[in-house]
Image: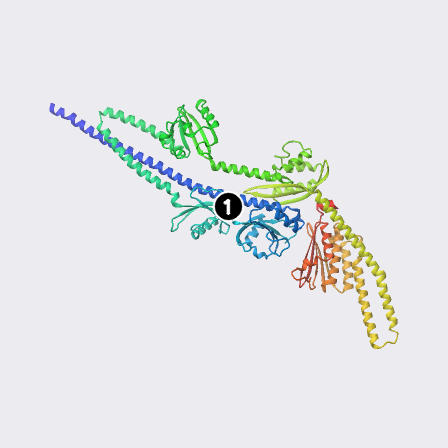
């Protein structure tokens, strides 16, 4: 019994010791395995984040380059928009306009071209008046022309210029034309290297290369770099764009290895900016993470084996082991809690400071930022590692002593040129500092601010009074000329309308000047989207007398936001000069009519009587006994006299027509056409709208003179058998056609029939009469006859009313 009793405790003790050893070994294995899994997850998660960061940099690089391309296209478009408002272009005075184009600043090697679908009008690549190449040498696709008519400003694809033997890109602006079919396009042809230089200066991230493709996916070249794997890349990119994707990324496999392509397509130009990088550079963080995981696994395994062996050699009683296990568990819980807190904020750089400003903890992101060993950071003074910044130092002191959180941005003292976003949170042991690099966002905001300052400076440099409205009509920006005009005319307040609704201002102005109602309605139509633009003229009485201004409103889009720009341009001098010219033209036409009337009277009362007297004398000569040859000669003389009298009656009738004021336009033209037809044996077809008698008398007189001059030209030159007079009225225009079936206008070699026709006296007179009413004249001639088309507004424009 005693022997047996003595053995039992020994056996029990041995079994318990074996179980304890097994538990220690199992706990060490589980701890090492768990630590390995956590470390692997953290390392691999950081690697994935680094890889995502590289991809994000590529997307940001393509987006930034696309934004730079849009800004460059917009800047070139602003040059064209400024030129489109030139008065020289409106009055079609192309020679001074050509000189203005030559004097306009533009990119090196760029040239201006004014053209339409039929021909080139002028180009700064040629002297004014020099023969222009055919319009086929300046190819633009029908698709881009349709887009140009719809949006007003486009960027062409790459075009080869045979004259300069280089590839160019055309920035084109659709010019407004009052006449249907009279479209004109102003293009700035820029070497493609100009856009490439802007993209090259965007400084893409390390490893990334930028490329530009036009909307046809042709590479815009500015260097010798070739688009990698282009045969596979372009189909994938085309499919992505066809699906409606404006940006994104995809992989392309090739013999030399895969590449990653990030793209951004501009909604304004249709161009695509690509950023490419070899796949191996992107996967480098994953390869590095695997190496670290294997190293960590081996290290943890060795540490686990060593710690288990040490623990087994120093195993004491069961109670001591239990106490040690409880203590280890508490430490493990605390460690896991700290690890969870770090993982929760791993996207930002993180460090903790004690009350002596010593760094007590730091995460992996912050270690990558400082690029220092952990031993050179932990336990060292924050200021010794990072440096001093007066404002951040004050905020840090307030957080430590006053327990006040802080959030703000400052330039980095550790990495100059970087902008850092700081968050400081007080803790019982000191403060926690979170910071991240926001340099790209800061530069983007700075770029936007610089663009706004540049836009404001550009507006301030213009002499016109300019206001920019939002889509509701609220004034959001004005230029210095606007402020100066307001100050000179006694308007109170410093804002001078900023923040006010422009339509409300017009509505209040209507109480003092009913003429503002027309402008109010026009601006309201532009703001509501019913019209794209509006133009009118108004009078403004200032301290130094009355002035005349041209107001123009145009609606445009900036991304998905609509804006309205309103300009007021002082045209007092232009109106005065044009009024003098119009008055002089009117006096010349009046003198011409009086001279024609005097000539008609002289021909009828004097020359015609002499011809009649000669005819009577010839009748007496016939009574003489003349030989047959003499009688034949008398017959020929008699026939010539009859033809001369007939021609004389026709010309006197054309020179001195019936009075318009008493009979009205329709009746006067009807009587004049009937008389003309009887005297010339020329069939005349009249199709006149009866409402023409309600037009202003001055406009009726001008239309009648055009009919008179047109019939005279048909009789003198056309050799026609029929002429059609057609007058129709639209809601806002009067349109007159004079069409004959003659042989057309014969032109000199190298000249069109229309150009030669302008060298006469009658056609310039027609143009002058129409210009007094804001109208125009067009002539189309061919083998089947000639058509004169005269148009004029039914209501006299404000400028013409002023001249009247």
Other-residue count near label 1 (Cα within 10 Å), few / some / many at <14 / 14–19 / ≥20: few
Whether residue 1 is visible to the viewer of this picture, yes or no, is no
Q: Give the colour scheme of this rendering.
A: rainbow
The foreground one among 709 and 724 is 709
Q: Position of residue 131 (x, y in %)?
A: 62, 57
Q: Position of residue 41 (x, y in %)?
A: 35, 37
Residue 4 vs residue 103: left or right?
left
Q: Residue at x 55, y 39 (%)?
A: 451
Q: Position of residue 769 (x, y in %)?
A: 73, 52
Task: Determine the secondary structure under disc 1.
Answer: helix
Q: For the image shown, how many numbered marks are present on the structure?
A: 1
In the image, residue 517 above or below residue 658: above
Q: Position of residue 541 (x, y in %)?
A: 72, 38
Q: Residue at x 48, y 27 (%)?
A: 391
Image quarter (top left, top right, bottom left or bottom right) of the N terminus: top left
Residue under label 1, please give it. Answer: 197
In the image, residue 760 above or below residue 32: below
In the image, residue 213 above or below residue 491: below
Quadrant position of residue 7? top left
The foreground one among 441 and 130 is 130
Whether residue 225 is visible to the viewer of this picture, yes or no, is yes
The foreground one among 216 and 359 is 359
Quadrant position of residue 630? bottom right
* Residue found farthest to the bottom: 627
In the image, residue 9 above or below residue 472: above
């Amino acid at each position: 019994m005693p022997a047996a009793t003595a053995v039992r405790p020994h056996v029990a003790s041995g079994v318990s010791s074996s179980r304890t050893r097994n538990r220690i070994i199992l706990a060490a294995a589980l701890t090492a395995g768990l630590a390995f899994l956590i470390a692997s997850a953290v390392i691999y998660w950081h690697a994935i984040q680094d890889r995502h960061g590289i991809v994000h940099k590529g997307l940001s690089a393509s987006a930034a380059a696309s934004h730079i391309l849009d800004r460059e296209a917009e800047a070139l478009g602003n040059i064209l928009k400024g030129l489109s408002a030139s008065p020289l272009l409106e009055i079609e005075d192309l020679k001074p306009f050509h000189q203005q184009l030559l004097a306009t600043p533009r990119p090196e090697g760029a040239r201006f071209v004014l053209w339409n679908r039929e021909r080139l009008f002028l180009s700064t690549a040629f002297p004014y008046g020099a023969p222009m190449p055919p319009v086929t040498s300046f190819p633009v696709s029908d698709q881009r022309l349709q887009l140009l008519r719809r949006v007003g400003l486009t960027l062409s694809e790459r075009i080869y210029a045979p004259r300069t033997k280089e590839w160019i890109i055309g920035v084109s602006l659709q010019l407004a034309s009052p006449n249907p079919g009279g479209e004109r396009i102003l293009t700035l042809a820029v070497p493609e290297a100009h856009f490439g230089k802007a993209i090259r200066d965007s400084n893409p991230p390390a490893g990334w290369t930028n490329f530009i493709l036009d909307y046809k996916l042709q590479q815009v070249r500015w260097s010798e770099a070739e688009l990698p794997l282009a045969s596979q890349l372009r189909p994938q990119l085309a499919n992505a764009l066809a699906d409606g994707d404006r940006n994104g990324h995809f992989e392309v496999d090739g013999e030399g290895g895969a590449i990653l392509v990030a793209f951004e397509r501009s909604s304004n130009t249709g161009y695509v900016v690509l950023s490419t990088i070899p796949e191996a550079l992107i996967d480098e963080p994953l390869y590095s993470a695997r190496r670290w995981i294997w190293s960590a696994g081996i290290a943890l395994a060795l540490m686990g084996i060593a710690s288990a062996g040490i623990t087994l050699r120093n195993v004491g009683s069961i109670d001591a082991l239990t106490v040690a296990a409880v203590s280890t568990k508490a430490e493990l819980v605390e460690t896991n809690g700290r690890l969870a807190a770090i993982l929760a904020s791993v996207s930002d750089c993180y460090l903790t400071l004690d009350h002596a400003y010593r760094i007590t903890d730091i995460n992996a992101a912050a270690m990558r930022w400082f690029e220092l060993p952990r031993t050179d950071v932990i336990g060292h003074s924050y200021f010794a590692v990072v440096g001093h910044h007066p404002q951040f130092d004050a905020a840090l002191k307030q957080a430590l002593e006053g327990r006040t959180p802080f959030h703000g941005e400052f330039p980095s003292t550790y990495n100059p040129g970087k902008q850092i976003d700081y968050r400081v949170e007080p803790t019982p042991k000191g403060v926690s500092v979170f910071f991240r690099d926001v340099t790209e966002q800061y530069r983007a905001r700075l770029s936007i601010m610089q663009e706004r300052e540049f836009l404001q400076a550009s507006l301030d440099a213009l002499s016109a009074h300019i206001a920019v409205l939002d889509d509701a009509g609220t004034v959001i920006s004005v230029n210095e000329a606007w402020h100066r005009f307001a100050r000179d005319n006694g308007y109170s307040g410093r804002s001078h309308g900023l923040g006010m609704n422009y339509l409300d201002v017009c509505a209040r102005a209507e109480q003092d000047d009913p003429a503002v109602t027309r402008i109010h309605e026009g601006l309201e139509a532009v703001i509501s989207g019913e019209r794209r633009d509006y133009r009118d003229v108004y009078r403004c009485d200032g301290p130094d007398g009355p002035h005349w201004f041209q107001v123009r409103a145009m609606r445009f889009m900036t991304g998905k936001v609509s804006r309205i720009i309103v300009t007021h341009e002082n045209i007092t001098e232009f109106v005065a000069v044009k009024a003098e010219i119009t008055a002089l033209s009117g006096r010349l036409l009046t003198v011409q009519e009086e001279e024609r009337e005097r000539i008609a009277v002289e021909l009828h009362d004097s020359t015609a009587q002499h011809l009649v007297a000669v005819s009577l004398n010839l009748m007496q000569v016939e009574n003489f006994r003349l030989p047959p040859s003499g009688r034949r000669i008398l017959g020929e003389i008699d026939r010539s006299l009859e033809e001369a009298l007939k021609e004389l009656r026709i010309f006197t009738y054309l020179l001195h027509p019936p009075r318009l004021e008493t009979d009205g336009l329709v009746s006067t033209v009807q009587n004049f056409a009937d008389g003309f037809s009887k005297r010339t044996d020329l069939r005349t077809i009249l199709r006149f709208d009866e409402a023409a008698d309600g037009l202003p008398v001055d406009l009726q007189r001008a239309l009648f003179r055009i009919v008179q001059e047109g019939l005279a030209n048909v009789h003198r030159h056309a050799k026609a058998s029929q002429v059609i007079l057609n007058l129709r009225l639209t809601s806002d225009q009067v349109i007159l056609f004079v069409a004959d079936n003659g042989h057309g206008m014969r032109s000199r070699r190298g000249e069109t029939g229309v150009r030669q026709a302008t060298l006469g006296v009658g056609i310039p007179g027609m143009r002058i009469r129409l210009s007094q009413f804001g109208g125009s004249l067009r002539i189309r001639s061919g083998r089947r006859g000639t058509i004169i088309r005269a148009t004029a507004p039914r209501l006299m424009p404000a400028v013409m009313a002023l001249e009247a």
